[in-house]
Amino acid sequence: MKILNDEDIYQRELNRIFAQTWVYVGHESEVPEPGDYRQRTIGEDPFVFVRDENGTLRVLFNSCRHRGANVCRAEKGNTTHFRCPYHGWTYQNTGDLVGVPQKGDGFDHLDADEYGLREAANVDTYNGLVFACIAPDAPQLEEYLGGATWYLDMYFDLIDMEVIGDPQRWVVDADWKTPTENFYGDNYHVPMGHKSAIDVGIGSETATGEEESELYGIADCDGHAFSIYQIDSEKPMFWGHPEDVVETFNHDALDDDQHEVARRSGVTLGTIFPNLSFIFLGGRDDPNKDPVGTFCLRQWQPRGPGKMEAWNWILAPKDAPAEYKERVYEVGMSTFSAAGNFEADDIGIWDGIDDAAGSVFVEQTEATTLFTMGRGENAAATIDDDWAGPGTAYADGGLTDENQLDFYRTWYETITTEGAE
């Protein structure tokens, strides 16, 4: 348990995980026009996610090359230049240094070309999702995503999505690994942890129907993992989207196997290592209203041992009617925002885990947690050899700890990599 609340381990995570892997920084739709920008972080480091005047997506380190002050202090906006509030050094949104006050008096030999804003060594986009990696020798993004691309294509190739509104942000007294582990596919916690929401009828209709169904945990997917609820129904599920919205989807963009999984999907959740999670389901905030296809991207930002900042983006099909997008936003806010019905359930549990992890008792007794569900002699979960996608598909309701162990294996391999600092 100690790894969930330990200063030394946390510092190693910042250096060996967040500074070495591809980290999500935003969605293309958040910066649609040249000059649009958003403040973002990689680990705890401040960056500006910007579409420069040429239309290129950049992730600029938010620190003046003169004395290090933040050159951007607004959360979002549109600008051609960033000016340091300390001494006035000015940079184009490309990062180039273009203005130094009293340059002829104090910096007449300064080579401006050498003092532009530093930026992430690698920036790339996959289906609208923008990632950055600080390490210059990073693998290509698509290589890093590996088998996860099959599943990401199933969502983002099928549906042209856009972010609705700004991401919600809230601080939680829990380690970033705790929700990440949960979104690797902790299907076991739903009946107990979210019982109150289910009892009042605001659980996902696409996960509680009377049709035959199967819940799969997808592990061994190049360090990433998914949980997919499949429903056998003549009615296309597509995560609860209504027929008129489904008609706008790019059905020809998927192969037959991907399309069949999407057609039968009631709920999907998953995580791209290290800290980008998502959930896609037919959600509702009122048992008397029809469900809507609710899609949330979640990011668990490290803010110290035993502390994180949760970010939540709500997305909707770009070509859907405006009133449908509004409804998607309403349901997303009522379920998975800081005060959402489901989110509040989890937060109250997660902070207790990390309180225990940082306790003297755990330190002195070297207490551990249990990861044996659905493994070995504990009625090992059935592997579906006919599953069409990459990874290992565990059936039987996905009641196995294989997904969570997959996360911790990837975490351990990454944090113990020699020469990463």
Image (cartoon, rainbow, N blue to C red):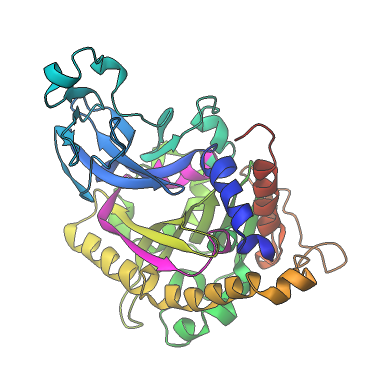
Q: Is residue 158 visible?
A: no
| Quadrant in the picture for residue 401 | bottom right
Q: Is residue 403 left or right of residue 336?
A: right
| Quadrant in the picture for residue 290 | bottom left
Q: Residue furthest right?
A: 377
The quarter in which the C terminus is drawn is: top right
Q: Nearer the viewer, residue 132 or 271?
A: 132
Residue at 59%, 57% (x, y): give it: 7
Q: Nearer the viewer, residue 220 or 346?
A: 346
Would you place residue 105 above or below residue 290 in this image?
A: above
Q: Nearer the viewer, residue 343 or 203?
A: 343
Residue at 18%, 31% (x, y): give it: 89
Task: Please provide the residue range marked out in magenta.
Answer: 149-178
Q: Nearer the viewer, residue 235 or 49?
A: 49
The quarter in which the N terminus is drawn is: bottom right
Q: Position of residue 414 (x, y in %)?
A: 65, 42
Would you place residue 18 above or below residue 286 in this image?
A: above
Q: Is residue 266 left or right of residue 33?
A: right
Q: Is residue 39 visible?
A: yes
Q: Is residue 151 magenta?
A: yes
Q: Is residue 317 left or right of residue 147?
A: left
Q: Position of residue 76 (x, y in %)?
A: 21, 48
